[in-house]
Amino acid sequence: MKDGELEKKLEEIVNSFLETSKGENIEVISHFDTDGITSAAIMIQALKRLDQKFSLRILKGLTKEIINSLDKNKIIFFLDLASGSLKDIQDRDLKKVYIIDHHEIDVEKIPKNVEILNPELTSKQKISSSGLTYLFCKKIDERNKEFAKIAILGMIGDMLEKEIDELNNGILEDGEIQRKRGLLIYPSTRPLNRVLEFSSNPFISGVTGNPKGVSELLREANLNQEEGKYKNLIDLTEEEMERLVTSIVLRNPEKKHQDLIGDLFLIKLFGKLEDAREISAKINACSREGRPEIAIGFCLENLEYKKKAESIHTKYKQQLISGIKFAQEQKKINGKGYIILNAKDKIKDTMIGTISSILANSTTYEEGTVIIGMGYDGKEKIKVSGRNVGRNGRNLKELLSTVMESFNGEVGGHHSAAGCLVDIKDEEEFIERIKRELEIEVIKIENHQNL
Ligand SMILES: [Mn+2]
């Protein structure tokens, strides 16, 4: 590893942990996305190997209330979260806390009793929590090398796969991962027609969710069935791959050729080579459906959980495709520089953020357009997701915060992707307020350009 400082910290924290944890109860608390799930899966297997007593909790987010309910007699091990909650952790005065994370840190001084492994403190190197957890566990016991492939899934889940080489610590070799250049559509291990039909990222107009469109595209690319079956993406020759990419670019003129091509990673799971992006999406789907324990069991290569994870993922993909179709056909509020899609109960609240992102990534709207998606949560709230088309756009976190001053609810997210929860009773008023705000913004930008 290049970064000596991070390496030193790693050594320190491993030694501290081994000394402090013997015979103690450990509570592992991790984040519910793919990076958090894979971090937890690696950690609990390493703890089992140490014969360590532990419990595991997976959270959507870490709140002050949760921190204040933590057991003061346990050693708490946070993964992929907690860097932004150090103040609250200090106030709780816990026995001993370990944190492995890569998010921003909220205090200048690390509280006593807290040991933290986070590149933000040292090299600022881009690495997932799963990668850090892997390095931690490998330092504890060389045999934990077997979890390298799980660490790769977390890198991919956090879209850090371009940094894998930077890690330079043999993580790909450790995990016996195969890499191949190709079209970034997954799963590359399944027949082409199926993969294209369910491709949401990239979203291919006229092809995603449309079997007839899929056949047309494949015919155009001169890719034909062999013995009644299309080839798997991974098995295409370079030339065939090239023709396929060209046909896709023709349908999405704004997508650049190089954005569609990248590294495909194949990992061996349950004794079979699988596309790492597909596995990562599967883990994510389980968590988003509120079943993180299935995602964990799947990462531990438990066959029973594999079946459950697959059925959740299949359902999730179908919902996603029908959500996309709905979003395309549904009448939207079309303002100047913005689109509001109020899906009501037609798109689930857990799906509305993803669908808004897909709309923002499709080539339907001009750069700078704001996409606002709204979906009911089945209780009394509406989940609102804001996304910018392209890299330049308005600050959506600020925009939603301004609108939400008139309602009750918190805003989360950042510049180009933000969201909030609104009471259903405020639906109409919220739409009016946000329209007004979006229009003011346009006027401001236009004035600015006139100057
Ligand atoms: Mn992460």
Image (cartoon, rainbow, N blue to C red):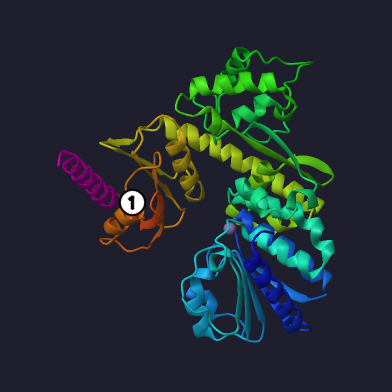
Residue 285: % across, % down? 61, 48
- Label 1 secondary element: loop
Q: Which residues are magenta?
A: 428-451
Q: Position of residue 311 (x, y in %)?
A: 69, 44
| Residue at the (61%, 57%) spot, across then down | 127
* Label tally: 1
In magenta segment, residue 444: yes
Query: Which residue is disc 1 drawn over?
Result: 395
Picture quarter with the N terminus: bottom right
Quarter of the view holding residue 367: top left
Left or right of 295 in this view: 331 = left
State the residue in front, 32 or 246.
246
Residue 144 location (% of width, % of height):
81, 62
The quadrant in which residue 211 appears is top right
The kind of secondary structure the magenta stretch mainly shows is helix
Task: Please give the name of the residue rendered at 73% of the width and 33% of the height, measured from the top-left corner.
Answer: 189
Q: Is residue 285 visible?
A: no
Q: Nearer the viewer, residue 24 or 20?
A: 20
Residue 397 located within the stretch drawn in magenta:
no
Left or right for 302, reference 332: right
Q: Residue at x 40, y 57 (%)?
A: 380
Figure quarter occupied by ligand 1: bottom right
Q: Which quadrant is the C terminus positioned in?
A: top left
> Where is 415 relative to 83, above or below?
above
Left or right, residue 140 beside residue 432: right
Q: Position of residue 320 (x, y in %)?
A: 54, 39
Residue 232 visible in rendering: yes
Identity, as a three-letter code, of the amino acid under mark 1: Asn
Q: Residue at x 82, y 73 (%)?
A: 50
